[in-house]
Image (cartoon, rainbow, N blue to C red):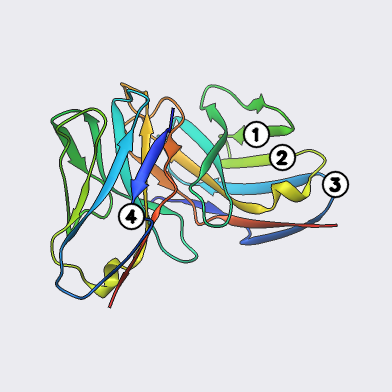
Amino acid sequence: GESVGLHLPTLSVQEGDNSIINCAYSNSASDYFIWYKQESGKGPQFIIDIRSNMDKRQGQRVTVLLNKTVKHLSLQIAATQPGDSAVYFCAENKNDYKLSFGAGTTVTVRA
Amino acid sequence: NAGVTQTPKFQVLKTGQSMTLQCAQDMNHEYMSWYRQDPGMGLRLIHYSVGAGITDQGEVPNGYNVSRSTTEDFPLRLLSAAPSQTSVYFCASSSSRQGIANEQFFGPGTRLTVL
């Protein structure tokens, strides 16, 4: 069936470097995409979202890119900090109240 | 403003027992939902509600019941607990009225173990 997935389950990045987390989706009907951050023992926290009529959106130190041609979503974190260590999830919505999550990428920041 | 609160934080049940996971939000959000998270997996939607008196099934509804008598509360009931329901349960809410158009706020989770 259709699903949202992440390319890599883990990512190790040097503090201060930029991080890129990737996500592939297969449902071309999805029109809303979200990135969440989940720290150990906590609930997911909203980072940034993007609608299908956009291809880029920027927030504070984060940028989300959407490539609808290849059904690819990415989250870029600038100047990665130790506090960025967490599991990152992408999720999609088809404007039907149901949010579908990918399996997550664990980001570890090396000092 | 407490956001989304969940109780209990931890719970151990024996197979066949029933219990209710509580969820409350003080943001006057219309949309509320329940997810379960299993190791190495993303969150899966169990049930959701778009307003008081309105509920619907998500991806994995079997073995769970919900009701929404008020805007603030959205309890999740396990009718007869099974080991396969061992998981971490998250409640979330959103102000969206048409689909999930706005960010969802998640509670801290309830870690449930069924023996």
Residue type at mark 3?
Asp
Check the residue under mark 3 and report the chain it is in.
A
**Label 2 packing within 10 angstroms: few (<14), some (14-19), many (20+):** some
Say yes or no: labels 4 and 1 on the same chain. no
Could you say which disc has been placed on residue A65 in the image?
Answer: 1
Q: Does dot 1 land on a helix, a strand or a loop?
A: strand
Residue at (31% x, 46% y) in the render: B34
Q: Is residue A89 left or right of residue B5?
A: right
Q: Position of residue B24 (x, y in %)?
A: 31, 37
Task: State which tag comes first along the sequence, 1 or 2.
Answer: 1
Q: Which residue is mark 4?
A: B8
Could you say which disc has been placed on residue A76 in the image?
Answer: 2
Residue type at mark 1?
Leu
- In depth, the one of A93 and A30 nearer the eye is A93
Q: Is the residue under label 3 in contact with that under label 4 (CB below 8 Å)? A: no
**Label 4 packing within 10 angstroms: few (<14), some (14-19), many (20+):** some
Task: State which tag comes first along the sequence, 3 or 2.
Answer: 3
Residue A84 seen in this snapshot:
yes
Inter-mark Cα distance, 4 to 1: 38 Å
Foreground: disc 1 or disc 2: 2
Q: Does dot 3 land on a helix, a strand or a loop?
A: loop
Foreground: disc 4 or disc 1: 4
- In depth, the one of A52 and B42 nearer the eye is B42
Check the residue under mark 4 and report the chain it is in.
B
Q: Which residue is mark 3?
A: A17
Q: Is the residue under label 4 in contact with that under label 2 (CB below 8 Å)? A: no
Q: Is the residue under label 2 in contact with that under label 1 (CB below 8 Å)? A: yes
Inter-mark Cα distance, 1 to 2: 8 Å
Q: Does dot 4 land on a helix, a strand or a loop?
A: loop
Residue type at mark 4?
Pro
Inter-mark Cα distance, 4 to 3: 39 Å
Residue at (50% x, 35% y) in the render: A33
